[in-house]
Image: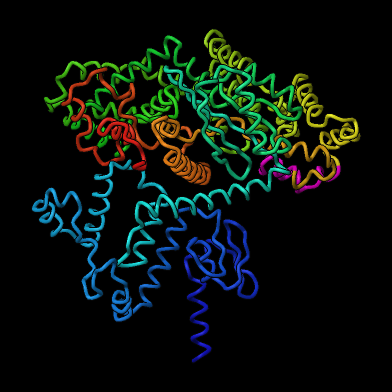
């Protein structure tokens, strides 16, 4: 009987759904498939490892996906609920200490506590609440918290939001929320320390991989200039600080001193390159850094250059005309609630347009989306539901929209716009994901140009128009010797028989080597090592190295197989570990303006600075984790309801303004940042 029970328990364990996330090893050991850590204690310890919940003796997994974590937490929670008998639960509730001078015999019923909204509308809200289920009662309380405090609906997408709900639910009734003072002092200091510790961990790799300083700038028409400094390395990107450079933004000497201080913060020996946008006095800063830091490169922002290419594409006459026609259709659909509902019905609940990180990206993403919905749009405008509804079928805009949707020339233009833009949107995605891309930008741009040539193989005039735009931006904005060196050292390019290296690429590569290896002693055996690499000798010739050329990131490939050329290996890892654009994380520049306002006192400003430091780095960490697999780095989740694809006129009437939202006021169908600003103005954030 005992043997039978043991066999039964073993079978049950084998069937545990969490085994799909682990590899069973000898004994009672398991290997996590995400971080490859080996754990003692079997599937139970693996669950605590994947759940990332505080647990003695179990390190949380730092690579597990959020959906897996949520699933495992639900499994753990359900098993704990089964183990707890009703009597135990009652005993736990009775042991909860009452807050303040409340008697221990008082009933704790936090969900029934009157909210400010309930105090204003007690009768209506109490009647509404009395008909709700337990789940709905909880959701109602959370919703009231969002509405009362004007929170962006996208807050509900953050990983910390669900983690907070889980923690509160696990604690049970009687939880006393931290006070304003506790949040601003104790927890602000604690969380900032935790975030800074992660930066310290990342610093350990800089000696090998080096790092990139990113200088991201915002300026307005009132001589305001803010600079955000970030540092990026293969493991992650960190926000360092925000500086108000308004008083000396055009002063090369003052800017040079600022950059000197930031370089010293990270260590001159660790910095491989500095990426800055065109807002700076580029020539002056470049000269200063080249003269004073022999091993640091200055590079343009690849994502900014690609956006300029797409922007010029959109200004070509026939492309601009196509975009304007498409916007006539989208404005008509998004400015009438019933029309929007009908469109979503025919589109399977999908949006017709997309909001990208820039205006030009939004245009080409929206054209791409409309092309996918072409047959459904035609079907909708020809449907009885549309033609029999007088509220929109007889409007003048309706006639224009039908004419556009039925125009084959319009759709051919849309197809052409998508064909010429998609290769460069693809490059933009690759360089904007926070991944090291210095080794691939040259190849990506070459392939994008080849796509244009192939598409316009029979139209030399159009081909020249778009390639001239690309070549001009590449020459004036994007090309960097570091990109050429990265291409030369990338094994997937170097060993590709179809690739013939241009003399200019080799020339740039040798220039980079001379800069990174400035003395004859450092360059003593470098020629032989280059020969060993280019001819694939030594470890470069082993089967594992050859099989990994196209499947492993270039930096990691050199780390694993570059021992036959140790000096070149160190150089290659440092070059191939760098990003080539500013990280396209959505920035709230109004927040940084508030840090630097003169109206704040010193203590207040320090508190806000710490909050922004934590906020920015938490969001960067989340974006770095989810971007490669779950989201498009160049596209936002919400539609910008103030964009040219939606806004019907410069001064819409109040009824038109409200009519646009209609039944779509669920947070997923509008840009809630714009909605919040329109409704409530630019309140000071965090209540400071």
Query: Residue visible at 18% across and 49% down?
Result: 117
Write down the quadrant of residue 108 in the picture.
bottom left
Q: How is the image coloured?
A: rainbow
Could you say where residue 254 lies in the image, as x and y percent from the top left?
Answer: 60, 22
Residue nearest the viewer, comparing 479 with 201: 201
Q: Is 635 contained in the magenta span? A: no
Q: Which residues are magenta?
A: 538-558
Q: Does residue 242 lie above or below 225 as drawn?
A: below
Q: Is 557 contained in the magenta span? A: yes
Residue nearest the viewer, comparing 499 with 77: 77
Q: Does residue 71 lie above or below 666 as drawn?
A: below
603 horizontally vs 236: left or right: left
Query: Residue visible at 13% across and 48% down?
Result: 120
Write down the quadrant of residue 375 in the picture.
top left
Could you say where residue 155 lies in the image, as x and y percent from the top left?
Answer: 36, 45
426 horizontally vs 488: left or right: left
């Amino acid at each position: 009987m005992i043997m039978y029970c043991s066999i039964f328990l073993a079978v049950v364990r084998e069937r545990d759904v969490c085994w799909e996330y682990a590899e069973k090893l000898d004994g009672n050991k398991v290997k996590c498939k995400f971080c490859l850590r080996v754990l003692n204690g079997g599937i139970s310890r693996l669950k605590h490892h994947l759940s990332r919940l505080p647990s003695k003796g179990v390190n949380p997994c730092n690579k597990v996906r959020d959906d897996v974590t949520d699933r495992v937490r639900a499994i753990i929670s359900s098993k704990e609920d089964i183990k707890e008998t009703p009597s135990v639960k009652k005993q736990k509730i009775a042991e909860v200490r009452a807050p303040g001078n409340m008697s221990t015999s008082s009933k704790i019923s936090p969900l029934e506590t009157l909210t400010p909204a309930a105090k204003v509308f007690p009768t209506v809200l109490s009647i509404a609440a009395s008909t709700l289920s337990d789940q709905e009662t909880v959701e109602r309380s959370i919703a009231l918290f969002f509405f009362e405090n004007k929170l962006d609906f996208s807050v509900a997408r953050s990983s910390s939001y669900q983690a907070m709900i889980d923690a509160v639910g696990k604690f049970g009734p009687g939880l006393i929320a931290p006070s304003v003072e506790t949040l601003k002092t104790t927890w602000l200091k604690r969380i900032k320390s935790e975030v800074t510790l992660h930066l310290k961990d990342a610093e350990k790799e800089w000696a090998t991989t080096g790092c990139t300083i990113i200088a991201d700038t915002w300026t307005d028409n009132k001589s305001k200039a803010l600079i955000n400094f970030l540092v990026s390395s293969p493991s992650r990107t960190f926000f360092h600080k925000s500086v108000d450079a308004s008083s000396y933004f055009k002063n090369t000497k003052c800017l040079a001193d600022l950059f000197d201080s930031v370089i010293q913060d990270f260590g001159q020996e660790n910095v491989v390159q500095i990426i800055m946008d065109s807002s700076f006095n580029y020539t002056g800063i470049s000269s200063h850094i080249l003269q004073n830091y022999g091993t640091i490169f200055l590079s343009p922002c690849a994502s900014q250059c690609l956006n300029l290419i797409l922007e010029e594409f959109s200004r070509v006459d026939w492309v601009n005309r196509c975009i304007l026609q498409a916007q006539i259709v989208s404005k008509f659909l998004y400015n009438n609630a019933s029309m929007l509902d009908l469109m979503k019905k025919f589109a399977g609940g999908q949006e017709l347009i997309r909001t990208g990180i820039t205006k030009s990206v939004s245009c080409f993403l929206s054209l791409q989306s409309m092309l996918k919905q072409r047959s459904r749009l035609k079907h909708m405008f020809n449907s009885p539901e549309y033609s029999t509804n007088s509220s929109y079928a007889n409007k003048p805009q309706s006639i224009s929209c039908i004419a556009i949707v039925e125009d084959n020339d319009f759709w051919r233009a849309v197809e052409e716009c998508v064909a010429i833009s998609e290769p460069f949107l693809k490059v933009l995605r690759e360089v904007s994901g926070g991944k090291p891309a210095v080794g691939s930008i040259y190849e990506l741009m070459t392939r994008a140009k080849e796509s244009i040539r192939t598409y316009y193989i029979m139209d030399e005039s159009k081909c020249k128009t778009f390639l001239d735009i690309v070549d001009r931006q590449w020459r004036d904005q994007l090309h960097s010797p570091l990109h050429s060196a990265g291409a030369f050292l990338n094994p997937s390019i170097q060993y590709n028989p179809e690739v013939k290296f241009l003399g200019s690429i080799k020339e740039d590569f040798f220039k980079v080597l001379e800069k990174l290896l400035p003395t004859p002693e450092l360059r003593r055996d470098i020629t032989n090592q280059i020969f060993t690499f280019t001819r694939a000798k030594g470890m470069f010739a082993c089967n594992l190295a050859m099989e990994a050329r196209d499947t492993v990131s270039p930096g990691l490939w050199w780390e694993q197989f570059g021992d036959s050329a140790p000096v070149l290996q160190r150089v290659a890892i440092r070059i191939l570990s760098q990003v080539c654009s500013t990280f396209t994380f959505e920035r709230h520049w109004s927040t940084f303006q508030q840090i630097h306002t003169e109206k704040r006192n010193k203590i207040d400003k320090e508190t806000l600075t710490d909050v922004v430091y934590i906020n920015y780095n938490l969001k960067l960490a989340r974006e770095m984790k989810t971007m490669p697999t779950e989201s498009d780095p160049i596209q936002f989740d919400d539609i910008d309801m103030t964009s040219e694809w939606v806004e019907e006129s410069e001064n819409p009437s109040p009824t038109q303004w409200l009519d646009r939202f209609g039944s779509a006021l669920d947070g997923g169908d509008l840009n809630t940042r714009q909605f919040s600003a329109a409704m409530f103005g630019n309140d000071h954030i965090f209540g400071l």
